[in-house]
Amino acid sequence: MEIQTIQKFLHTSPRKLRLVSDMVRKMEPSKALDVLGVTPKAAAKDLEKALRVVLANAKQQGLDTSKLTFKKIEINESMKMRRFRAGTKGRVKPYKKRMSHIKIVLSDKEVK
Protein backbone atom coordinates (compact mmCIF):
# COMPACT_ATOMS: atom_id res chain seq x y z
CA MET A 1 0.00 0.00 0.00
CA GLU A 2 1.21 3.49 -0.76
CA ILE A 3 0.77 6.61 1.33
CA GLN A 4 1.52 10.06 -0.04
CA THR A 5 1.45 13.69 0.97
CA ILE A 6 1.90 16.89 -0.99
CA GLN A 7 3.01 20.13 0.65
CA LYS A 8 2.40 23.06 -1.67
CA PHE A 9 3.68 26.62 -1.98
CA LEU A 10 6.61 26.40 0.42
CA HIS A 11 8.66 29.58 0.51
CA THR A 12 11.92 27.74 -0.03
CA SER A 13 13.60 27.42 -3.38
CA PRO A 14 13.51 23.96 -5.00
CA ARG A 15 17.28 23.85 -5.37
CA LYS A 16 17.80 24.17 -1.61
CA LEU A 17 15.17 21.51 -0.87
CA ARG A 18 16.66 19.09 -3.41
CA LEU A 19 20.04 19.28 -1.67
CA VAL A 20 18.45 18.10 1.57
CA SER A 21 16.13 15.53 -0.02
CA ASP A 22 18.99 13.87 -1.91
CA MET A 23 20.70 13.36 1.42
CA VAL A 24 17.83 11.30 2.93
CA ARG A 25 16.39 9.63 -0.17
CA LYS A 26 18.01 6.20 0.41
CA MET A 27 17.35 6.08 4.17
CA GLU A 28 14.46 4.65 6.13
CA PRO A 29 11.87 7.33 6.98
CA SER A 30 12.40 7.04 10.75
CA LYS A 31 16.17 7.42 10.36
CA ALA A 32 15.62 10.31 7.92
CA LEU A 33 13.64 12.16 10.62
CA ASP A 34 16.58 11.89 13.00
CA VAL A 35 19.02 13.15 10.36
CA LEU A 36 16.76 16.04 9.33
CA GLY A 37 16.41 17.09 12.96
CA VAL A 38 20.13 17.81 13.26
CA THR A 39 20.75 19.10 9.72
CA PRO A 40 21.74 22.79 9.91
CA LYS A 41 19.91 23.84 6.73
CA ALA A 42 16.63 25.76 6.89
CA ALA A 43 15.12 23.59 4.14
CA ALA A 44 15.48 20.56 6.41
CA LYS A 45 12.67 21.83 8.64
CA ASP A 46 10.22 22.00 5.72
CA LEU A 47 11.12 18.49 4.61
CA GLU A 48 10.91 17.19 8.18
CA LYS A 49 7.38 18.58 8.55
CA ALA A 50 6.27 16.93 5.31
CA LEU A 51 7.82 13.63 6.40
CA ARG A 52 6.04 13.79 9.77
CA VAL A 53 2.73 14.34 7.96
CA VAL A 54 3.15 11.33 5.67
CA LEU A 55 4.18 9.12 8.61
CA ALA A 56 1.11 10.27 10.54
CA ASN A 57 -1.05 9.43 7.50
CA ALA A 58 0.48 5.96 7.36
CA LYS A 59 -0.15 5.41 11.07
CA GLN A 60 -3.74 6.57 10.61
CA GLN A 61 -4.18 3.94 7.86
CA GLY A 62 -2.95 1.26 10.27
CA LEU A 63 0.43 0.60 8.62
CA ASP A 64 3.56 -0.34 10.53
CA THR A 65 5.79 2.72 10.21
CA SER A 66 8.98 0.73 10.84
CA LYS A 67 8.52 -1.28 7.61
CA LEU A 68 7.91 1.70 5.32
CA THR A 69 10.38 2.82 2.66
CA PHE A 70 10.58 5.84 0.38
CA LYS A 71 9.15 5.11 -3.02
CA LYS A 72 9.46 8.68 -4.27
CA ILE A 73 10.48 12.11 -3.04
CA GLU A 74 9.75 14.85 -5.57
CA ILE A 75 10.68 18.48 -5.20
CA ASN A 76 8.87 20.47 -7.87
CA GLU A 77 9.01 24.13 -8.69
CA SER A 78 5.95 26.19 -7.89
CA MET A 79 5.11 29.69 -9.03
CA LYS A 80 7.61 32.49 -8.74
CA MET A 81 6.83 35.80 -7.09
CA ARG A 82 8.32 38.52 -9.23
CA ARG A 83 9.76 41.37 -7.22
CA PHE A 84 12.07 44.27 -7.92
CA ARG A 85 14.55 46.46 -6.13
CA ALA A 86 14.99 50.08 -7.09
CA GLY A 87 18.20 50.74 -8.99
CA THR A 88 20.10 53.87 -9.78
CA LYS A 89 18.79 56.49 -12.20
CA GLY A 90 15.20 55.23 -11.90
CA ARG A 91 15.97 51.73 -13.12
CA VAL A 92 14.54 48.46 -11.83
CA LYS A 93 16.52 45.41 -10.66
CA PRO A 94 14.12 42.45 -10.94
CA TYR A 95 14.43 39.14 -9.06
CA LYS A 96 12.23 36.12 -8.38
CA LYS A 97 11.27 34.59 -5.05
CA ARG A 98 10.92 30.91 -5.83
CA MET A 99 8.49 28.50 -4.18
CA SER A 100 8.29 24.73 -4.28
CA HIS A 101 6.06 21.69 -3.79
CA ILE A 102 7.11 18.55 -1.91
CA LYS A 103 5.58 15.18 -2.80
CA ILE A 104 6.54 12.19 -0.64
CA VAL A 105 5.30 8.67 -1.39
CA LEU A 106 5.94 5.86 1.10
CA SER A 107 5.42 2.19 0.37
CA ASP A 108 5.33 -0.87 2.60
CA LYS A 109 6.60 -3.12 -0.21
CA GLU A 110 10.24 -3.62 -1.10
CA VAL A 111 11.34 -1.20 -3.86
CA LYS A 112 13.75 -2.70 -6.38
Image (cartoon, rainbow, N blue to C red):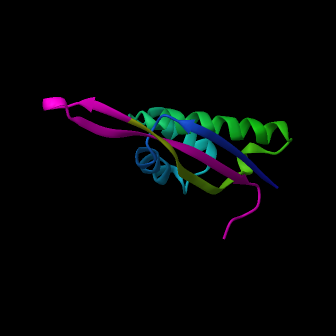
Q: What stretch is highlighted in magenta?
A: 83-112
Q: In which quarter of the image is the C terminus?
A: bottom right
Q: Which of 13 and 49 is in front in this view?
A: 13
Is 8 covered by the magenta stretch?
Answer: no
Q: Residue at x 53, y 35 (%)?
A: 46
Count of marks placed on residues? 0
x, y percentage for residue 34? 53, 37
Q: In screen coordinates, is 33 left or right of 68?
A: left
Q: In which quarter of the image is residue 5?
A: top right
Q: Nearer the viewer, residue 74 or 81?
A: 81
Where, quadrant-wise, is the N terminus in this rendering? bottom right
The reply to whether the magenta stretch includes residue 92 is yes
Quarter of the rendering containing residue 58: top right
Q: Report the side of 3 relative to 49 (left or right).
A: right
Relative to 67, say whether 48 is above or below.
Answer: above
Q: Which of 49 and 77 is in front in this view?
A: 77
User: Residue at 72% across / 64% down in the picture?
Assistant: 110
State the image coordinates of residue 97 (x, y, percent, origin top left). 40, 37
- In this view, the residue farthest toward the bottom is 112
Q: Residue at the spot x=41%, y=44% of the render?
A: 16
On the rendered structure, is 33 left or right of 94?
right
